[in-house]
């Protein structure tokens, strides 16, 4: 075997003479899939399914179907607005959900709101503002009532015994005492003038509390009427709940009666600062400045030529008129 023969041609017959050697054609292998076997086994993604709401079968909770006219037939004395408010309250109630606990607490929040409003009103009434202004008015009245103008002008009793009596009494019957009284009256007038705005603010707050209590009373009355209707509505199916609702209707009705009774007291509480404002504006700030000017002029006359009995008496009439207005 020649040394240059390829090892792969060992069993092949030699080419015949005159034949041209041709290249060997190899058959191409079958085409392989571009996907790997693992990838081919994966499922194709699918579009997500739409999530549908889950429907659970059950019984629909029926609400109370009642009109204002129905409630007016139950309580003919109730105003139309009250019946309408009770009907709106009942429209949100499902009788099937009522139990004894809910019945016991029916309207409790309204009673608690009323108690809080009353406590707030009491705190306002106990503020020292009114008492302080009232004390200023009382002191002003006391000073004016103690002034003896005839004695100040020297037309009273004379002599040693009279002088000793004047020194021991609480009358304002000397020019020096009158000068001190005029100075204190001016101070009281300034204090009362400054207190007017604060008294007006207090009256506004009391009025707001009164309006809040009135609204609460209306809501309590509506809750009482609604409880009365509900008790009749559930009497056959839930007698214990109905009994609790009857109790609440009575309790809420008693609260309404208490609110109406307290209304007169609240009006008196509101009237106190209003009366003081009127007294300060119509008497103290109107008549007192002129009287103080006249008393100062009388003191000047008493120190100079002396005031006549007529002048002292005329000024005394003016003083008495102011005293009568302050005491009313």
Image (cartoon, helix red, strand yellow):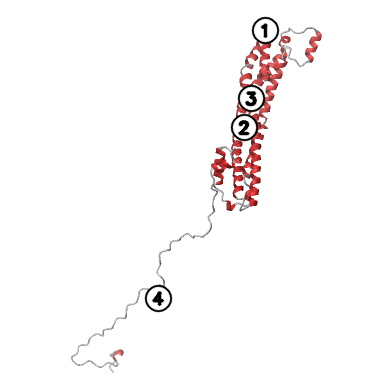
Q: Is residue 273 above or below residue 112?
A: above
Q: Determine the image quadrant of residue 5.
A: bottom left
Closer to the N terminus: mark 4 or mark 2?
4
In the image, 201 versus 305, the foreground residue is 201
Crowding at dot 1, Cα within 10 Å, few <14 / some 14-19 / many 20+, comes out as some
Nearest-to-viewer mark from 3 and 4 = 3
Say if 309 sits above or below 38 in the image. Answer: above
To which residue does mark 4 refer? 37
Residue where numbered disc 1 is placed: 311
Q: Where residue 230 sits in the image (x, y, percent)?
A: 60, 47
Query: Can residue 104 be seen?
Result: no
The image shows residue 268, relative to residue 26, as above or below, that is above
178 sits left or right of 47 in the view: right
- Pointer 4: residues within 10 angstroms few (<14), some, or many (20+)? few
Q: Are marks 1 and 2 in contact (CB under 8 Å)?
A: no
Residue positioned most to the right: 161
Counting residues from the start of the chain, the first of labels 3 and 4 encountered is: 4
Mark 3 or 2, nearer chain start? 2
Q: Position of residue 111 (x, y in %)?
A: 64, 42
On the image, numbered disc 3 is attached to which residue? 275
Q: CA distance from mark 1 to mark 4?
A: 132 Å
Q: Tell me the CA gap for discs 3 and 2.
A: 14 Å
Q: Is residue 112 above or below residue 325?
A: below
The x and y percentages for residue 27 are: 28, 83
Between discs 1 and 4, the one toward the N terminus = 4
């Amino acid at each position: 075997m020649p040394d240059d023969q390829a090892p792969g041609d060992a069993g092949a017959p030699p080419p015949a003479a005159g034949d041209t050697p041709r290249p060997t054609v190899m058959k191409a292998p079958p085409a392989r899939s571009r996907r790997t076997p693992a990838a081919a086994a994966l499922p194709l993604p699918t579009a997500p399914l739409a999530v549908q709401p889950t429907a659970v079968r059950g019984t629909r909770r029926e609400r109370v179907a009642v009109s204002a006219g129905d409630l007016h037939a139950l309580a003919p004395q109730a105003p139309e607005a009250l019946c309408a408010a009770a009907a709106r309250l009942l429209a949100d109630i499902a009788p099937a959900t009522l139990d004894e606990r809910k019945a016991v607490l029916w309207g409790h929040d309204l009673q608690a709101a009323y108690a809080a409003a009353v406590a707030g009103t009491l705190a306002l009434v106990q503020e020292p503002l009114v008492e302080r202004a009232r004390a200023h008015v009382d002191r002003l009245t006391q000073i004016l009532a103690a002034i003896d103008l005839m004695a100040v002008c020297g037309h009273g009793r004379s002599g040693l015994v009279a002088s000793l009596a004047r020194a021991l009494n609480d009358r304002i019957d000397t020019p020096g005492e009158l000068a001190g009284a005029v100075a204190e009256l001016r101070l009281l007038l300034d204090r009362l003038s400054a207190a007017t705005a604060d008294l007006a603010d207090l009256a506004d707050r009391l009025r707001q509390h009164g309006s809040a209590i009135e609204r609460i009373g209306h809501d309590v009355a509506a809750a009482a009427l609604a409880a009365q209707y509900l008790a009749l509505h559930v009497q056959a199916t839930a007698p214990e709940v109905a009994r609790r609702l009857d109790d609440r209707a009575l309790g809420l009705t008693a609260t309404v009666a208490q609110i109406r009774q307290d209304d007169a007291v609240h009006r008196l509480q509101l009237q106190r600062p209003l009366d003081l404002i009127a007294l300060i504006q119509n008497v103290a700030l109107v008549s007192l400045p002129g009287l103080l000017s006249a008393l100062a002029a009388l003191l000047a006359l008493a120190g100079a030529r002396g005031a006549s009995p007529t002048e002292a008496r005329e000024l005394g009439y003016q003083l008495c008129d102011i005293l009568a207005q302050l005491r009313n």
